[in-house]
Image: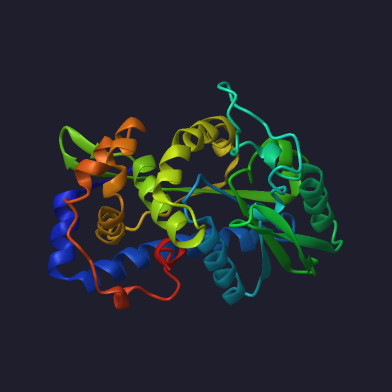
């Protein structure tokens, strides 16, 4: 795990924010390049790339960047989001957790037969019709996208269950797994550190408000369930990954934490009850980075702030 000192983050943001952003982004690009090289070197035997990670780990942007990098290396790819295989809310027996609450993190919320069948068909060179899921309406639409792998092409499949045996077990011989997450801890003091999953909460709260029509109170309410799902459905399968990507950008909370501060005031009590006290303490601690023109077009930050 990478450990960053808050003091150093703030000093770099104050001293030269442009350099800080560029160095952070270059480190991310270098990692993408390394993974793309691995995928391209094995793509004939393993044309399925399983891109996995917990909530708000940056799977969508990383899938796109990985595709672009492989394209530059001469290997064309198709990106498919497992999110599009979620079933319409209320159209199936929804799984519940130990407290009897709906378990939205369970892979059983997905159309597993359709997804497994599509992955097998792709590996065999057959065409599939990828569905489209409308998150604000919580339903699958009638829109589909045809996908078929030609020679020297790969499919990049991203989703929180991409390495789960229940979905990908039969693909072991023809796939390669890549796991991504926030792999950084921000050290505020010797006694106060922001753990990676807390930094992901900040990402998710901003993203859900901006893109999924979900108020921060809803993100807070779901967070315990999200963490439970990660421990049950994601963490056990991390060893299946051939590579692990740390998607945290050292400058990102100079943007995200300050955006959250402006929006979270009505929900401080809810955050405390959800075990997010340390985020409340950190809201005022990050040097603000307000010049968004410094962010490159392909940055992972656009996945959260637009």
Residue 276 visible from this viewpoint: no
Q: Residue at x 71, y 54 (%)?
A: 46
Q: Quadrant of the N terminus?
A: top left
Image quadrant where residue 76 sits:
bottom right
| Residue 69 position within the rendered picture, expressed as x and y whole percent measured from the top left | 54, 70
Total labels: the figure holds: 0
Q: Residue at x 23, y 66 (%)?
A: 289
In the image, taking residue 45 as reference, residue 236 lies left or right, namely: left
Residue 11 visible from this viewpoint: yes
Q: Residue at x 61, y 33 (%)?
A: 102
In the image, taking residue 21 as reference, residue 111 lies left or right, namely: right
Residue positioned most to the front: 266
Instruction: Decide: is 153 above or below 216.
Output: below
**112 or 69: nearer the eye?**
112
| Residue 119 position within the rendered picture, expressed as x and y whole percent measured from the top left | 77, 52
Colouring: rainbow
Q: Residue at x 65, y 38 (%)?
A: 164
Image quadrant where residue 123 sits:
bottom right
| Residue 92 position within the rendered picture, expressed as x and y whole percent measured from the top left | 76, 39
Q: Quadrant of the C terminus?
A: bottom left
| Residue 232 position within the rendered picture, expressed as x and y whole percent measured from the top left | 56, 30
Instruction: Decide: is 175 above or below 251.
Output: above
**280 or 215: nearer the eye?**
215
In the image, taking residue 55 as reference, residue 271 lies left or right, namely: left
């Amino acid at each position: 795990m990478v450990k960053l000192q808050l003091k150093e983050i703030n000093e770099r943001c104050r001293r030269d924010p442009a350099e800080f952003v560029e160095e952070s982004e270059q480190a991310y690009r270098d990692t993408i390049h390394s993974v793309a090289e691995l995928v391209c070197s094995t793509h004939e035997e393993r044309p399925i790339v399983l891109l996995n990670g917990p909530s708000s780990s940056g799977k969508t942007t990383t899938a796109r960047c990985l595709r672009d990098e492989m394209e530059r290396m001469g290997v064309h790819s198709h990106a498919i989001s497992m999110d599009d295989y979620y079933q319409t809310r209320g159209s199936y027996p929804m799984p519940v957790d130990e407290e009897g609450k709906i378990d939205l993190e369970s892979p059983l919320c997905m159309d597993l037969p359709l997804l497994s069948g599509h992955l097998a068909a792709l590996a065999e060179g057959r065409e599939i019709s990828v569905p489209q899921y409308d998150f604000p309406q919580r339903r699958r639409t009638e829109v589909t996208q045809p996908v078929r792998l030609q020679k020297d092409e790969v499919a990049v499949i991203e989703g929180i269950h991409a390495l789960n045996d229940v979905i990908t077990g039969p693909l072991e011989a023809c796939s390669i797994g890549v796991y991504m997450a926030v792999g950084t801890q921000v050290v505020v003091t010797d006694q106060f550190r922001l753990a990676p999953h807390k930094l992901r909460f900040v990402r998710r709260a901003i993203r859900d408000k901006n893109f999924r029509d979900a108020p921060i109170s809803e993100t807070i309410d779901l967070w315990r369930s999200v963490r439970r799902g990660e421990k049950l459905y994601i963490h056990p399968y991390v060893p299946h990954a051939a590579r692990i990507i740390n998607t945290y950008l050292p400058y990102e909370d100079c943007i995200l934490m300050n955006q959250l501060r402006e929006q979270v005031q009505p929900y401080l009590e809810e955050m405390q009850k959800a075990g997010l006290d340390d985020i409340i303490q950190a809201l005022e601690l990050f040097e603000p980075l307000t010049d968004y023109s410094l962010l490159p077009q392909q940055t992972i930050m656009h996945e959260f702030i637009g």
